[in-house]
Image (cartoon, grey):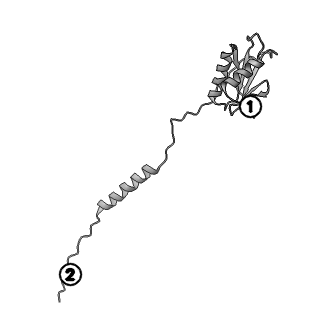
Amino acid sequence: MNLRPRPRERIEINLTSLIDVVFLLLIFFMVSTTFDRFSELQIKLPEADGEMAESDPSVLELVIDSDGRYYIDREQVLNTELETLKRALAKTAPAGRDVPLVINADARTPHQAVITAMDAARQIGLMQISFVIKEPGEATQE
């Protein structure tokens, strides 16, 4: 019998496979993580200080709601097409055409709806266009 102790083998841990697994997990989390998009702008519509204009009965009021629908003197325009809006404005505007047009657009109105309204007014000869704004600190009506 051999009573001599056998030399113990040195135990090694192979780190190569462990590093591979860590890199795979790192790649997985990098690919599957969603990031905030900083390219999207969040804007707040401007407010303006100004004096309240006197109401003039010869003013033509155009209201645009948040869905882009038009209302002339509290009556809804049939659709949102440029030609329809031009006809409705021409029918409602007095013959002199130098009547001021007041555009009252909701803060969430699509920009295209306001541009279409301005274009229609210009094409029928309404050149005095103003906008209704909210004064700073004024409560909004919702």
* Pointers 2 and 1 in contact (C-beta within 8 Å): no
135 lies above or below 38: above
Mark seen at residue 86: none
Q: Which amino acid does label 2 sit on?
A: Pro
Q: Which amino acid does label 1 sit on?
A: Thr
**Closer to the camera, 64 or 130?**
64
Marked residue nearer the N-terminal end (2 or 1): 2
Q: Name the residue under label 2.
A: 5
Residue 133 showing in the rendered view: no
Say which element carries label 2: loop
Residue 13 coordinates in the image, percent (x, y): 29, 65
Question: Residue 69 in the image: x percent, y percent?
Answer: 71, 31
In the picture, the quarter occupied by the N terminus is bottom left
Q: Residue at x 20, y 76 (%)?
A: 7
Check disc 1 and report the residue beneath it. 140
Instruction: Pinpoint residue 47: horizontal percent, then vertical percent.
Output: 67, 24
Residue 111, percent from left and from top = 62, 28
- Quadrant (top left, top right, bottom left, bottom right) of the C terminus: top right
Secondary structure category for the residue under label 1: loop
Circle 1 packing at 10 Å, graded few (<14), some (14-19), many (20+), is: few
As measured in the structure, the alpha-carbon distance from the residue carrying label 2 to the one carrying label 1 is 91 Å
Image position of 27 (left or right of 8): right
**Residue 37 appears in the picture as rendered:** yes
Neighbor class of circle 2 (other Cα within 10 Å; few <14, some 14-19, many 20+) is few
- Residue at coordinates 76% horizontally, 16% vertically from top-left? 93
Disc 2 vs disc 1: which is toward the camera? 1
Q: In the figure, residue 127 lies in which quadrant?
A: top right
- Residue that appears at 23% across and 73% down: 9
Spot the residue most to the bottom. Answer: 1
